[in-house]
Every structure is written in C-alpha cells, then in structure tokens.
Amino acid sequence: MAAVAYAAASRVYPGASAVRAVDRLELSIPDGEFLVLVGPSGSGKSTALRMAAGLEDVDEGAIHIGDRDVTDLPPKDRDIAMVFQSYALYPHMTVADNMGFALRLRGVPKPEIADKVKEAAGLLDLTKYLDRKPKALSGGQRQRVAMGRAIVREPSVFLMDEPLSNLDAKLRVETRANIAKLQQRLGTTTIYVTHDQVEAMTMGDRVAVLKDGVLQQCASPRELYENPANAFVAGFIGSPAMNLGTYRVVDGGARLGELTVPVPRPVLDAASGLDEIVLGVRPESLGLVGAGEDGFELTVDLVEELGADAYLHGTVDGASERIVVRVDGRTPPRIGEKVRVGLRDAGEVHAFHPETSRRLG
Amino acid sequence: MTTATATRQAEPASPAPRKPKRGLGPGALTAATWIVAILFVFPLIWMVLTAFKTESDAFTDPPKLFFTPTLDQFAGVIDRGFLPYLGNSAFVTVLSTLLVLLLGVPAAYALSLAPVKGTSNALGFFLSTKMLPIVAAIIPLYVISQNVQLLDNVWALVILYTAMNLPLAIWMMRSFFLEVPTEMIEAARVDGASLPTLLYKVILPVVAPGIAATALICVIFSWTEFFYAVNLTAARAGTVPVFLVGFITSEGLYWAQLSAAALLASLPVMIVGWIAQNHLVRGLSMGAVK
C-alpha cells in the first residue's frame, strides 16, 4: 500500500495545436484512500489514470507512488494493478490463469499462485468458474475476474477505469457496493475513474472533478455537493443537475421571476460591482408552495415521475433557463399547469461569478 | 388530371400497400445453392471417379457412372516417378511457409501494434512488390538463378515462394493483429509481461486462428504454383504441378492416370484445409473484451 501523488503532471498530445489532455494536475492521494476521478468525456480523467499506470507518458511534472518517483518507470515496475473498462481478460486462458498470470510472470511458485487465486476467487464468488474461459462467463462474472486479477497481485495501488460501465443498471449498483466494501477490507489505495457522478458520490472517500484536463475541485462527496468550487462542479455533481442561471442582482439578493432569492451578505459583498450573478439552486432545494407564499410561477412542460419523487421541468415567464423542481411523486402537477415554486431553505443557494464562474462568498 | 393529382396527394396518408415478398422462397434458395455447389464440385467428383477407372473405362462415351474401381492408375502414377516431385513440393511448401511465418509475424506485429513514422510507407512497399506480373520478372529471375547456380534447385523455389507470399501474409496477419484489443495488451503490460512474453503468451494465442488462415493460404499458393516451377526447374527440382503437365504427351491424354495424379496432388491441400478449418472458425478474440 502506498500514497500516490501527481506533482503538476501534464500529458500533452503533440500536433499542430498541442492538446493538454491533463494540465498540471496536482493531486495527492493518501495511503488507503478511495479517490474517484470524475468528469465528462474528454475531461482527461482516464488519461490521468493511465499516466499513473504508466500507459501514458508524463510530459511535464512527476508522479510518485509511495516514496518512489515512477514518472519514467514502465507499468510493471510500478506495483499497480489495473481494471479496464472492457475487462481486457485473456480469452485463451482460464479464469484461474487469468488471475494468476501476473504472479506467474513474477516467478511465484505454482502452489502459492493457486492458493492466492483461490482466496481471491472466494472473495469474489468465482470459485465455481476457475476452470472456465472468459467467453463462458456472463458480463458480471467477467467483471469480477478482472477485479480478481487485480486483487491477486496485492499491489500497492488499484487503478480502475470505468469498471462498471459495461454492466446493466441493477448489477452496476450491486457491484458498486461490492467494490467499495472490498476496497475498505483490503485497504488498498484506489484511483477510480467514472463519468457517473452517482458512482463518484457513493464510492469515493474523495472525489476529484476534472474538466478539459484541469482539476476543478477535489473534496469529499458531501463537500462537493454542499460547497462546489465553481459553476461547473455545481452543475456536474448532483442528479438531476443543479439549476444554474444568470440573474439580476437586486438589493438583498437576486431576482428570479417575481421572487427575490435572498443571497447572504458576504456573497453580495463579493458580487459588488456585478449587475448579474450565476445562481445555483438544486431541484431538491425547491418545492411547491401555496398562493401568497414567497415564490415564483413556473409553467410545467415536462414531468419525470420516478416513483418516490417527481421532477418538474419548466420555465419562468420572462426567463430562458429551464428550472427543475423536485416534488412529491404521489401528486405531481400535470404538463401545462402553472405552479408556484418556493425556496425551502435560503442557505441552499449557491452563487457564482458570471465570468470566472468561481464560487462567490 | 385534377383527380389524379388529388389521389396522388392522398396516397401518403393511407397505409402503403404491403409489397409482395420479392425473390424466391427459402426452398428455392436452398435448391439454387445446391445446384451451384454441385456445378462447382462436379469436376472434382468426376476427377475422383475417373481416377479409379481403367483407361478404357475413362474413354467410354457416354461416360460410365458404374464401373469396377481399380487402384492401377495410382500405381502407374507412382511408377512414372511421382514421389520425388511430391517430395519437392512438400519441401518447398513447408519450408517457404515456415519462413513466411518466421519473418511475417514480427513484421506484422511491428506494423500493427508498434507503428512508427514510416509504417504506412513500408506497407505500401510490401504491396507494391505484388504489382509486377510475375511473367515480367521471369527473365531476370531466370538469369539470376542461372548465375547463382540455383536453376533446377528446390532452394530457388523456397526463396521465390517465400518472397511471393510474404507481402500477402504480412498484410493478412497485420489485419488480425489490429483486431487484438489494445486494453488486453495494456493489461498484460501492467501484469508485467515483457515483449517476448506479450507476443508469445498473449498475442499469438489470440491471433492463432488468423495465423493458421495465413499459413493455409501460403501452403495453397506454394503447392499450386506453376509458373516459376515450370520455368526454373526440370527433372531434379520439379514440383507436383510440373509433374502433372508431363501427362499431356504427344501420344495423347491418359485421362484416368492424369486424374489419379491430380487427385494425389490435391489431397495434401485438402487435408491441410480440413485440419485448419477448426482453427479458422474459432472466434478470434471472443471473450477478451465486453
């Protein structure tokens, strides 16, 4: 087990206009932590992971694993194990051989390999399938073999590149919990790449949000949710996404329809001189209110019923931004209806600079 | 006129009438397949039948379908010195195919999985060597063979067949190598595989069916090659196709014996094809990814 540190590590793809796939990434992952790298496609999250694996060059900066500088070491000398999105199993080997391949290459005695493979197989519920070839396994079983291949080696770092994205929704939720549990049990430092922010929120000790190769914020899931550092993180974390819109600053707040959304004093101070600010309110921070209460009119143009909850999508007269509101799933309004929406808690309003999109206050 | 326009406009609204199924039913298709297959196989069957006839049976008109089979023709073929030719063919085919694989596998690996700047040029160069018709090269080849004392020598054919098949084999194997999932190779690298381990323990087993297919093509091409063989060899280094031509004599054709010789000549290729078949149909990299 070991800590991992990116020290201003960059990956630059050369070309007519050089692309900085990962741009001066500064990130240190303490020993035993489960860190999730999350971001939209093209954000550089996979590249960052592959840099740690040694499958991608580090063009600037350095990467340390434990107390070693691994920047120029080949993958096999980094003491890492990787789980690939496609699992990348060896099709001509049995499950047991797949899992024991790395140990065999290292010259570990056969009985010892067999013991370790058996132990990992037990952990992953694969004992029955050890003699099968990958093509005779289901998607979930293949995924577990890929996990097993990583575990058997007892590496100091696990690197996982969207290991769940080829599973169906139900299995994904199940496996998600299993991986988190397994990681806790083994205590191995893990870097996990995903584009699914639910995975990021539920699995990670900390979550690092990337966009265009640049680290936006790295914090605990709760911190990301409650104090997003900028409008991008605010919009990316949370499902459905936070309502973000540019609104006029008035005395004591910002104007949303007929409602003056109260904005705390420090935020307003930070916004002094600005005519408009970007306001972020999560769908769950809004709710239906009765006539006469503080709120604004919303014309509903889409209702997503999820059972327990329903999400209303709608627009406010005179504003272009669509607003999503979470309401009780049992009695949702109908499409076309006008409803009155209010803020549940003034403390749950986020404000961002309209140009830099940095958090205000 | 007005009515016609109106009708035409109305048409899209009403459901389009279902088109009658075009073409033939599955039964007719099966029959057609059989007819084509028999047309293709018939000469082969006729060859096999004729090989077991006596020379006089082979010449009857109308041809006899029922006759007393005899192995005399095979004995005759062997008496006429078939075995040395068979030996030459086997030697040249096996050796040139092995050489093609030995040289082609590393080349295909380099050109597919470890490309460098000049890779596409190299590929184009390999292909360009196939663009010259062999007829155009035969005189220089003859002169060169004569100068290096390789006329009527099996080694000349080994070299030529290797050179002839290598570009094709590299292109074929390259396409198989390209289908190897990149992530599997990366997984092996992370697992600690060195280049030889990666190549022999991970990549080759996955592309084995493709290499078998390539080898089969090389075997067939070398075995059936006639032009070089007939021009560069004589009695000593002649191959089976050259031997077969020997049956076209001034005294006339010996149909039954020629058929027997042709059957013997095609048997090895059929056997190799049959063996390779199992490798060919096996999924290339089934189960590696997804």
Image (cartoon, coloured by chain):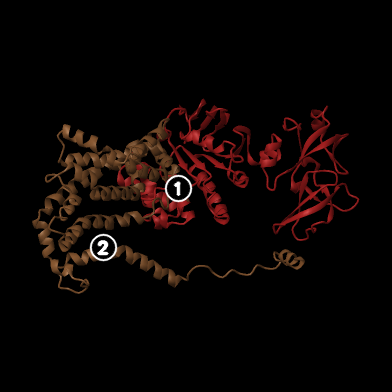
Nearer to us in this view, B173 or A50: B173
Colour applied to chain A = red
Q: Residues within 10 Å of mark 2 (few under 14, many from 20)?
A: some
Image position, residue B150 (x, y; %) = 16, 37
**Residue B253's mark?**
none
Q: Say whether residue A306 is left or right of residue A340.
A: left
Nearer to us in this view, A329 or B186: B186
Please name the amino acid that badge 1 sits on: Ala
Please name the amino acid that badge 2 sits on: Leu
Q: Quadrant of the C terminus of chain A?
A: top right
- When the figure is inspected, residue B45 is found, relative to residue A18, above or below; the finding is below
Q: Residue at x 75, y 56 (%)?
A: A303
- When the figure is inspected, residue A243 is found, relative to residue A270, above or below; the finding is below
Q: Is residue A33 visible?
A: no
Kind of element beneath mark 1: helix
Q: Residue at x 82, y 29 (%)?
A: A274
**Residue A146's mark?**
1
Q: Say whether residue B43 is left or right of residue B29.
A: left
Residue designated by label 2: B44
Q: Is residue B24 visible?
A: yes
Q: Residues within 10 Å of mark 1 (few under 14, many from 20)?
A: many
Q: Residue at x 40, y 68 (%)?
A: B32
- Label 2 or label 1, whichever lies nearer to me, is 2
Image position, residue A234 (x, y; %) = 70, 39
Pointer 2 indicates a residue of which chain? B
Kind of element beneath mark 2: helix
Colour applied to chain B = brown
Pointer 1 indicates a residue of which chain? A
